[in-house]
Amino acid sequence: MPPKKIFRCPWVKEDSELYLTYHDQEWGLPVHKDQKLFEMLCLEGAQSGLSWETILHKRENYRKLFKNFDPTKMSRIKDESLEKILKDPGIVRNRLKVFSVKKNARAFLQVQKEFGSFDRYIWGFVGGKTLHNHFTSMKQVPSQTAQSQAMSKDLKKRGFSFVGPTICYAFMQATGMVNDHLVDCFRYSLIKE
């Protein structure tokens, strides 16, 4: 008897173990740890204009070079260190994106101070719980929503960069603020439970 076919979201590259693992074990799973939220916000910003697969392949390098996305350490990093990081081929070498991590770390710490945690602040844009969409086709999945637009506007006001509404929506999808697995994807119901 042939093995039962597992249905996944069509954006997943079935021939990429890295992509499969990301989709099957991480994407859309609710994230509430501040440091992980900071990492995902930075990586989504780095991904802007590129494929997510590119960032997945470089993620370990990012973690190493950006002090495991510790916002306190990144807020204190010297510009000279960022200049060195900018030369590393293991990341996306875009000056604005690299320097935005320091800027965003400082803004992130201010949000933590004001709200007690970044988690409390960021999840407030979805009322503190995952919004479960019911999409049957990739054509139905938006690139931004009213929530991601509000998030983007507020983050920018607080001094964050590389947080446009499309980046914010990708961040919301990745961190489980919205469940955008298609309804026939095996992960959809697992996240909805």
Image (cartoon, rainbow, N blue to C red):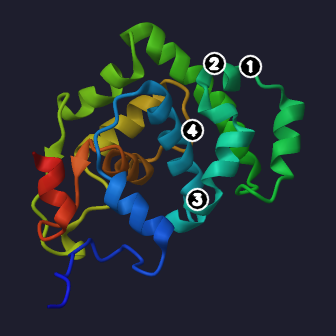
- Above or below, comparing residue 80 to residue 20 in the picture: above
Tell me the mark number nearer the camera, choosing from 4 and 3.
3
Task: Give the CA distance from mark 1 to mark 4.
Answer: 17 Å
Disc 1 and disc 3 in contact, CB within 8 angstroms: no
Residue 104 picture location, percent across and down: 59, 30
Q: Tell me the residue that label 3 is attached to.
A: 55
On the image, numbered disc 1 is attached to which residue? 76
Q: Nearer the viewer, residue 2 or 51?
A: 2
| Mark with earlier residue (1, 3) | 3
Residue under label 4: 161
Asked where in the image residue 100 lies, by quadrant, the reply is top right
Quadrant of the rendered structure where residue 8 is? Answer: bottom left
On the rendered structure, is 49 left or right of 181? right
User: Which percent across, then down, holds residue 35?
Assistant: 50, 28
Q: Amino acid at mark 3?
A: Ile
The reply to whether the C-beta atoms of the residues labelled 2 and 1 are less than 8 Å apart is yes
| Mark number displayed over residue 110 | none
- Going by the numbered disc 4, the residue's amino acid type is Ser
> What's the distance in space between the residues labelled 4 and 3, CA to CA?
18 Å
Q: Which residue is mark 2?
A: 72
Residue 51, visible in the rendered structure: no
Looking at the image, which residue is at 47% across and 34% down? 36
Q: Residue furthest bottom?
A: 1
Q: Classify mark 1: helix, strand or loop.
A: loop
Crowd around label 2: few <14 · some 14–19 · many ≥20 (10 Å):
some
Up-down relation of residue 185 to residue 27 (above or below): below
